[in-house]
Image (cartoon, grey):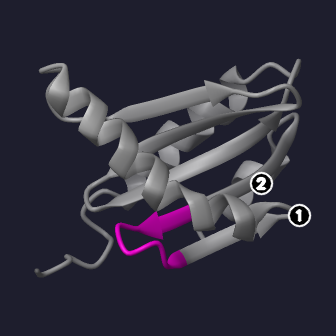
Amino acid sequence: MKLRGLLAAPGVRAAALVGRDGLALEAYGEEGERLAAELAALRADFERVSRRLGGGQLTRLAFTAELFEVVAVNVGEYVAAVAVTRGADTRPAQQELARVAAELQGALPVVRS
């Protein structure tokens, strides 16, 4: 699958791809399923903040915790993310995530409401 290669980037603990419904299309690493389970809610919360502040469409979100950093990008109606061990250089993971997101753009199923 597309995100599995992210695990080769230094410090990556987990990678996931989910839809707005929270269902994982892909989840890798020890915490992959847990990351996937939270991504849809995180996206909804950050989109609400962006809307309320007049920030426009959310394209990327990131946060840092004591032990890891999470970087996520929107891919149409989906969100792809990596969790990287705190202190590791996140640039390789971010570059690979951007590459994968570009590859996925237009290749994922269209969600009809």
For residue 85, above or below residue 24: above
Looking at this view, is 41 or 69 the one in front? 41
Q: Nearer the viewer, residue 16 or 63?
A: 63
Residue 12, placed above or below residue 55: below
Is residue 28 toward the left or the right of residue 47 in the image?
right
Q: How many marks?
A: 2
Count neighbours of disc 2 (C-alpha within 10 A) and say few if under 14, some if 14 to 19, many if 20 or more: many
Residue 23: x and y in percent read 49, 79
Please state which of residues 66 and 112 is positioned toward the viewer in this rendering. Answer: 66
Task: Looking at the image, tell me whether mark 2 or mark 1 is earlier in sequence order.
Answer: 2
What kind of element bears circle 1?
loop
Residue 75, above or below 88: below
Q: Amino acid at mark 2?
A: Ala
The CA distance from mark 2 to mark 1 is 6 Å
Q: Which mark is residue 106?
A: none
Query: What residue is at 27 percent from the left and 79 percent from the top?
Result: 109
Residue topped by disc 2: 14
> What residue is shown at x 73% (from left), y 43% (from top)?
83
For the C terminus, the image quarter is bottom left
Residue range highlighted in magenta: 17-24
Dots 2, 1 in contact, CB < 8 A: yes
- Residue 110 appearing in the image: yes
Where, quadrant-wise, is the N terminus in this rendering? Answer: bottom right
Residue drawn at point x = 76 percent, y = 28 percent: 65
Q: Quadrant of residue 82?
A: top right
Residue at position x 28%, y 40% from top?
A: 47
Where is residue 102 shown, x and y percent of the image? 37, 47
> Which residue, given by chain and number where applicable, does mark 1 sit on?
30
**Amino acid identity at mark 1:** Glu
